[in-house]
Amino acid sequence: MLSNERLWDDSVFVPRGTPRPAPQSLGQLMANLRLTTADDASRRAGIRRWLAANTPSDRLIRSIRRRGYGDLLATHAA
């Protein structure tokens, strides 16, 4: 289960027109995917889709494992 998002500020502020940096934590990824209030099945599906199209950083991999979603990395060649 994810922690209360009020306790973790994973916000990324960039100038308008600048691409957002790749997420470095599961909290950032969830916010980017608009899954912070979604049920677990929707979160897992969203993370799985993101992993299929993107390569997570080592830091993001650690965050995913630490937050209990490490099983989703098994299908990703990390």
Image (cartoon, helix red, strand yellow):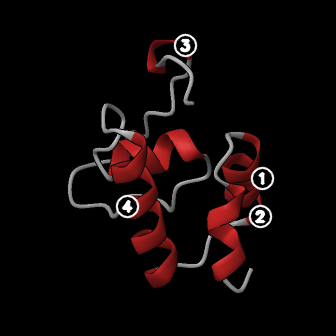
Residue corresponding to mark 1: 62
Residue 27 point in image, percent of width and height:
52, 39
The residue depicted at 47 percent of the width and 69 percent of the height is 48
Which badge, 3 or 1, comes first in the chain's sequence? 3
Q: Is residue 59 above or below residue 2?
A: below
Residue corresponding to mark 3: 7
Residue corresponding to mark 2: 58
Tag 3 near tag 1, CB within 8 Å: no
Which badge, 2 or 3, comes first in the chain's sequence? 3
Residue corresponding to mark 4: 46
Which badge, 4 or 3, comes first in the chain's sequence? 3
Task: Point out the frontmost of discs 4 and 3.
Answer: 4
**Type of amino acid at the residue the image marks with label 4:** Gly
Task: Point out the frontmost of discs 4 and 2.
Answer: 4
The residue depicted at 74 percent of the width and 80 percent of the height is 78
Tag 2 near tag 1, CB within 8 Å: yes
Tag 2 near tag 3, CB within 8 Å: no
**Type of amino acid at the residue the image marks with label 1:** Arg
Residue 11 point in image, percent of width and height:
43, 33
C-alpha distance separating marks 2 and 3: 23 Å
